[in-house]
Image (spheres, helix red, strand yellow):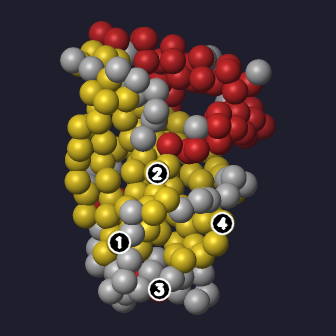
Amino acid sequence: MMKMFVRSLVLGASLLLAATAVSAGGIHYQVDTSTRFMADEAANLSGFRMTWTYEPEVSAVIIDGRNMDSGELRQLGEDIMEDLYGLGYYIQFTVNDRPVPFNKVTHFGIKLVENQRIQMEMQVDLKKAIPVAGTVLRLKLVDPDGSAVLVYSGAEKVVLANDLVSKCAGATLENQMMQLNGHDMDVQTASVVCQ
């Protein structure tokens, strides 16, 4: 029930943004993202730490006038994470073009930042750590509904753990138009090439 509640709030936010966010493909809202590729003690890729910051208008609809004390904020975070779990956290991750599975997120944080924007932080652990030598890592964040547009403002928003820096080049971003649920979406792919 809470899953549908949060989904409805986000959908409502999309509708409220219609006046400013209508494009040829439909209604969208932006989520500013950053990602850190994490390594285990053997310098294998172990997962990601992600930060997502929602637009002020979307945040206001999700909060919906509620008192955001620490308990209420934590409950909101749990509801959002449960909703995202059903959508695979919008993550499409491949190593040498092969999909890589990851675990359900158990470590996350939520807070309000400047302009009362909701900011979610989460740690996404791979089911099994992966040696990176000779690999190409590709990460897309895609909302299958075509409403949320998850955006890195620049390649500097995708960073590597210190143990990966000596093995891999810095991330590059490429944009690709995709059709999602009847929406034309400009989707970013973060690519990391490792030697």
Q: Earlier in the sequence, mark 4 or mark 1?
A: 4
Locate the C terminus by quadrant.
bottom left
Q: Earlier in the sequence, mark 1 or mark 2?
A: 2
Q: Residue at x 27, y 27 (%)?
A: 184
Q: Earlier in the sequence, mark 1 or mark 3?
A: 1
Q: Position of residue 173 (x, y in %)?
A: 25, 57
Residue hosting label 2? 92
- Between 134 and 84, the one nearer to me in the picture: 134
Residue hosting label 1? 136
Say which amino acid is labelled 2.
Gln
Residue 104: mark in rendering: none
The reply to whether discs 4 and 3 touch (Cβ–Cβ < 8 Å) is no
Q: Is residue 48 above or below residue 72?
A: below
Q: Nearer the viewer, mark 1 or mark 3?
A: 1
Q: Position of residue 156 (x, y in %)?
A: 29, 63
Q: CA distance from mark 2 to mark 4?
A: 14 Å
Q: CA distance from mark 4 to mark 1?
A: 18 Å
Q: Residue at x 43, y 18 (%)?
A: 14
| Neighbours of disc 2 within 10 Å: few (<14), some (14-19), many (20+) | some
Say which amino acid is labelled 1.
Val
Say which amino acid is labelled 3.
Asp
SS category of the residue bearing label 2 = strand
- Report if residue 77 is visible in the image: no
Q: Earlier in the sequence, mark 2 or mark 3?
A: 2
Residue hosting label 4? 127
Q: Position of residue 80 (x, y in %)?
A: 64, 35
Residue hosting label 3? 163
Q: Nearer the viewer, mark 2 or mark 3?
A: 2
